[in-house]
Image (spheres, rainbow, N blue to C red):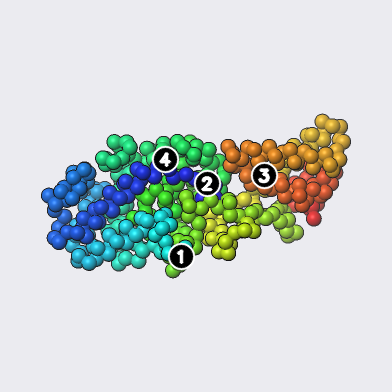
Amino acid sequence: MFWNIDVKEQEQDLMAVSHFLLSVFKFAADQPENVFLKEDWLAFAPENGAWFYRLYERDTENGKNMHRAVDRLFRMEHGQRERIWEAIKHDMEFMDKEAWENGRFSLESDQLSDAAQKILKDFFGYFYDVVFCTAHFHLKELSSPMYSRRELAKDYFKGKNKKIRRICPVCLNMISNGETDEEVEHYFPKSRYPCLCLHPYNLYFCCSACSSRLKGRKSPLKGKQRNIGSIFLPYLDTVKDQVQLEFENPGNKDSEVVSLLPVLEADPDTGEKIKEFDRLFSLEERWSGQLEEYYMSFYSRYQEKIKERSGKMSLEQLEEWMKEDIKRNEAMQSVRPGRYLEGEYMKWVMEKQLKAFYAELKSGCQCVAGDAGRDRN
Ligand SMILES: [Zn+2]
């Protein structure tokens, strides 16, 4: 993600859940029969088989799809069942760089037949929407006897992710959807990659703008692209470490704009990755829209200071103040990542716009965007 997020606290449980669901497909691939036989299943999965079978048998309104998906799976030819299992197993290893070939790893489950994809959607969809979000998993290897979305949220914010408790790791804005109510987002959308809907490396919490409003069902892989080596991945990449912000003051606009560019030492494909990341989350546009507010906030802060000094201020003095503020901002970023953009912007004003900013403060003009006083070129 843009800010560093940590998978450690939730990795084991979600991996156990994903691997258990995968095991149903392994069982199907190994079975010679075309029906899901209880005895054989319980012998195959002695620990958790009974719990799963109860859900399968229940065949309630919201569980119907799963029951039918399992039946449809077993009715498929043996070879097809094997292909499905292999594709899911392959995709679930996407975070394991040892499984990559020269920086490339192509997801395969979305290349399966339509019938197979429908099975995956119904099967995994049930386990995500119903079991995980409204009930719970009951598997022997889980750290909690009843594991659900609630346990995930608790674990997720327990460790290193504590500092992004109320900050969105993508856009760094405050989470406004309530402290315990952040949205669980799937980087690879569950509509297209249902088998990754409970995969620890595909789930993270973010603000509603970054989940439903902007990204929605957009896939990070555009068109025919399937190689995930060509995009940023939530836990494997920290975008912030690979970008630098470039601010500009285009004459035809009221205020500055910010662009995300690769850092100098970045890999050659980083520029493309940034573009794809921005296609999902529109950071450049949203962050550009925030600059005016930052500007006004430090403009009035320094006006206050000047007033305290009865209107006396030199260029050197202003630079001094800004340096102090930037330093303070940087120190705060480790606990308040939301200050990052403001800090970078302040640096740019100090390094590239200092004289103009000084002149503007001096003139004591209270005018805002669009007025002559705002033109600092
Ligand atoms: Zn966000």
Counting residues from the N terminus, which is met first, the one under dot 3 or under dot 4?
A: 4
For the question of whether residue 274 can be seen, the reply is yes
Gap in angstroms between the C-alphas marked 4 and 2? 14 Å
List the residue tagged with mark 2.
4
Gap in angstroms between the C-alphas marked 2 and 1? 24 Å
Dot 1 amino acid type: Asn
List the residue tagged with mark 3.
343
Residue 99 found in image quarter: bottom left
Dot 2 amino acid type: Asn
List the residue tagged with mark 1.
102
Query: Circle 4: is it few (<14), some (14-19), or many (20+) Cα within 10 Å?
Result: some
The answer as to whether callout 4 falls within 8 Å of ligand 1 is: no
Q: Residue at x 30, y 37 (%)?
A: 146
Q: Residue at x 64, y 38 (%)?
A: 331
Q: Secondary structure at mark 4?
A: helix
Tell me whether the residue at label 3 lies in contact with that at label 2, contact meaning CB atoms closer than 8 angstroms: no
List the residue tagged with mark 4.
9
Gap in angstroms between the C-alphas marked 4 and 1? 29 Å
Q: Nearer the viewer, residue 295 or 92?
A: 92
On the image, the x and y values in percent for residue 306 come to 82, 35
Q: Secondary structure at mark 1?
A: loop
Q: Is residue 300 left or right of residue 154?
A: right
Gap in angstroms between the C-alphas marked 3 and 2? 18 Å
Counting residues from the N terminus, which is met first, the one under dot 3 or under dot 2?
A: 2
The answer as to whether callout 3 falls within 8 Å of ligand 1 is: no
Residue 91 found in image quarter: bottom left
Query: Circle 3: is it few (<14), some (14-19), or many (20+) Cα within 10 Å?
Result: some
Q: Residue at x 50, y 60 (%)?
A: 231
Counting residues from the N terminus, which is met first, the one under dot 4 or under dot 1?
A: 4
Question: Which is in the foreground here, disc 4 or disc 1?
Answer: 1
